[in-house]
Image (spheres, rainbow, N blue to C red):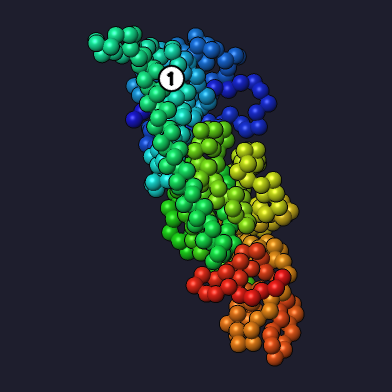
Amino acid sequence: MRAAVVLPWERSAEARAASARLAEAVGLAASIGLVIVHQAVIQLRERRPASLFGEGQVAALGAVVANEAIAVAVIDGPLSAVQQRNLERAWKCKVIDRTGLILDIFGERARTREGALQVELAHLEYQRSRLVRSWTHLERQRGGFGFLGGPGETQIEADRRLIGSRIARLRGSLEEVRRTRALHREARRRVPYPVVALVGYTNAGKSTLFNALTGAEVFAGNQLFATLDPTMRGLSLPSGRRAILSDTVGFISELPHELVAAFRATLEEVAEADVILHVADAAHPETAVQRADVTAVLEGMVEVGMLDAGWRARTILVLNKADLLGGIGHLAAREPGAVAVSALTGEGLATLKTLIDARIGAAREETEYRLRPEDGAGLAWLYRHGEVVARDDTAEAIRVRVRLTPAERARFEHPIGAPERDGEK
């Protein structure tokens, strides 16, 4: 389907360049199979309430749409329902804004039931905001039954009622998903492994890094939003400790608020993580802006109570795609505390694993246990998984002082299928 991508640009102190923003919009549109035959940055003197653009700009773009036989015009910015309707009338083609485009991409990529529910909820929330009285085809009245009389129900009221009912059902279904995920997290606490979550701007290389660290074969394409549904795999660390690595949906600038709310169940995996890996595309010209966009989304999660305010303390910045910049040596001194890697070549991954291991180990707390003399398996477990700092053997018991993470402590004290241990803390 032939399409045009138009970026409305205002003279304001925007952090990112118009060319980079337009290139991202073109990539988004192309990722769902649109053939981009025209792209342009249109300078706005002011935002017109009726059409966003000025009359001359609307006419000029209309001529391009007609000459190029364009079926879809993508406006990389927010459009009101009135503006969308008027532009469609003027250009005689389908018009979608940035939010609509991202929702379409998510709708095409979601694979799991949870993902499909989240996307449908976001779509309906968006559609409900489009139902305004300026849409004349929704102003028809549905006639009541003749024997009842009355004016009947207007089409717009009926659509709002139907959408509202469907949204209520979807929220109920997603609440079930959240409860299920909460049970899974509780199970992981009983047989716990530390959880490491990948976050980052879309196409920063999270899935490639996920595959490189775990040996998995998650789809990792050079396209925006290649991953939508969260995936978890085991991760082996240098100390012998095991962790769970979670790959999550990529973030993007101006992420539609409908998606932030709808994907709460997925983002909860980030909230529960012991370590957060913020993966940044170090080779991208807008890498600093992209990192700021990811941080803004995470801070937004804090504001709505989805994430604790201390998330920064457990976050590691990963500067990915070092192979495009001559190797990790060129990035090592760029950012103190960050780790440079190439998920594609494997360079720097050993250092990253060591850093993850150290970050998890730093969370260890000292605990004392009193074991039965015959509990050799328990003693071996503590030596294997913890850091034994003192031991006192008597005929009656073995007292061991050991440093464990909260997850390791829970795993030792409440192993599934085994009786509770006699631990003194």
Which of these two is toward me, 341 or 362? 362
Q: In this view, does 274 lie to the left or right of 211?
A: right
Quadrant where the image shows the C terminus = bottom right
Quadrant where the image shows the N terminus = top left
Q: In which quarter of the view is residue 152 placed? A: top left
> Which residue is the extreme one toward the front?
147
Q: Is residue 271 above or below residue 297?
A: below
Q: Position of residue 222 (x, y in %)?
A: 46, 47
Q: Where is residue 125 in the image (x, y as percent from the top left)?
A: 46, 29
Residue at (61% x, 66% y) in the render: 410
Q: In this view, does 21 lie above or below 334?
A: above
SS for callout 1: loop
Q: Is residue 334 visible?
A: no
Q: What residue type is labelled 1?
A: Leu
User: Dot 1: within a 10 Å radius of its alpha carbon, few (fewer than 14), some, or many (20 or more) residues?
Assistant: some
Q: Is residue 123 above or below residue 52?
A: below
Q: Mark 1 points at which residue?
A: 131
Q: Can residue 313 be seen in this view?
A: yes
> Which residue is the extreme one toward the bottom?
395
Q: In this view, does 17 lie to the left or right of 232?
A: right
Q: Where is residue 390 in the image (x, y as percent from the top left)?
A: 75, 80
Q: Is residue 386 left or right of residue 99?
A: right
Which of these two is toward me, 28 or 391? 391
Q: Position of residue 171 (x, y in %)?
A: 45, 38
Q: Is residue 93 left or right of residue 411?
A: left
